[in-house]
Amino acid sequence: MFEKILSCRFHIERHRNGPYAAERERYLIFLAAEGHSKSALRAIMCLLYSLAERLPLHLDAIAPVQIEAAATVWSAALHRSEQNRHHAKTWFIFHATGWLRFLGRLHEPTAVQPFAAELDAFLHFEEHERGFAPATLKIKRVCLRGFLAWADSQVKTLRTLGPEDISRYFTWLATQYRWKRTTISMHVTALRNFFRFAQSKGWCVPDLADAIGAPRIYRLERLPRAE
């Protein structure tokens, strides 16, 4: 995967021979499959090298407080403005959490999934009534869990959610990720399908699904770009 992101042999060998190279590469392959752009993967790859150097990866499991401590030390050493150091720390914590969770080495308390009953009912409908495959259902679950957790953090119920809340959610996503339009469209589709189901059950306001916009997908969008 390093060879697909970088062109300079020196930098490829540095990442290949660096700490926890196999674990870093597996995460990059996962992110690429999610639709991250090559430029985003390059930035994340550099960050992963710092994570591998600074996180206590000799431990079987790493707690969020240890991630934050490492992020604080790392960001404080950056020669940037206070605001940029804050953004860098947030970025460090986000990808450290995602990487360790992907590796199965994140120690975190079991969290209650907001709107779990509604989510399970929707996925059951998608599986048994519409015939979606397990892989597709897994993607839908990931997309919806993130949104429902965000809605819960905003003290929202399904009934009180409106189009402006959906817009705020995607604006928030844009500050956390550098997704392609195809990835955003995947999340939009999952939300639309969920809210059409929710509307049929009387859980949300009418026509909310139709108010969710999606980015335009061009005919050659999924083809790799020359860089």
Image: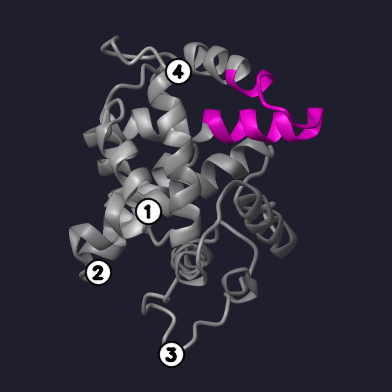
Q: Residue at x 69, y 56 (%)?
A: 171
Q: Position of residue 40 (x, y in %)?
A: 50, 54
Q: Which mark is residue 224?
A: none
Label 3: which secondary element:
loop
- Mark 2 or 3, closer to the camera: 3
Quadrant into which the C terminus falls: bottom left
Which residue is the site of mark 1? 8
Magenta residues span 74-93
Which residue is the site of mark 4? 54
Kind of residue sitting beneath label 2 = Glu
Q: Earlier in the sequence, mark 1 or mark 2?
A: 1
Q: Residue at x 35, y 28 (%)?
A: 100
Q: Position of residue 195 (x, y in %)?
A: 52, 64
Alpha carbon distance from label 1 to label 2: 51 Å
Kind of residue sitting beneath label 1 = Cys
- Mark 1 or 2, closer to the camera: 1
Q: Earlier in the sequence, mark 2 or mark 3?
A: 2
**For residue 136, which quarter of the picture?**
bottom left
Alpha carbon distance from label 4 to label 2: 48 Å
Q: Nearer the viewer, residue 39 or 211?
A: 39
Q: Which mark is residue 129?
A: 2
- Residue 147 seen in the figure: yes
Alpha carbon distance from label 3 to label 1: 31 Å
Label 4: which secondary element:
helix
Residue 86 is inside the magenta segment: yes
Which residue is the site of mark 3? 219
The relative height of residue 81 versus residue 179 in the rendered view (above or below) is: above
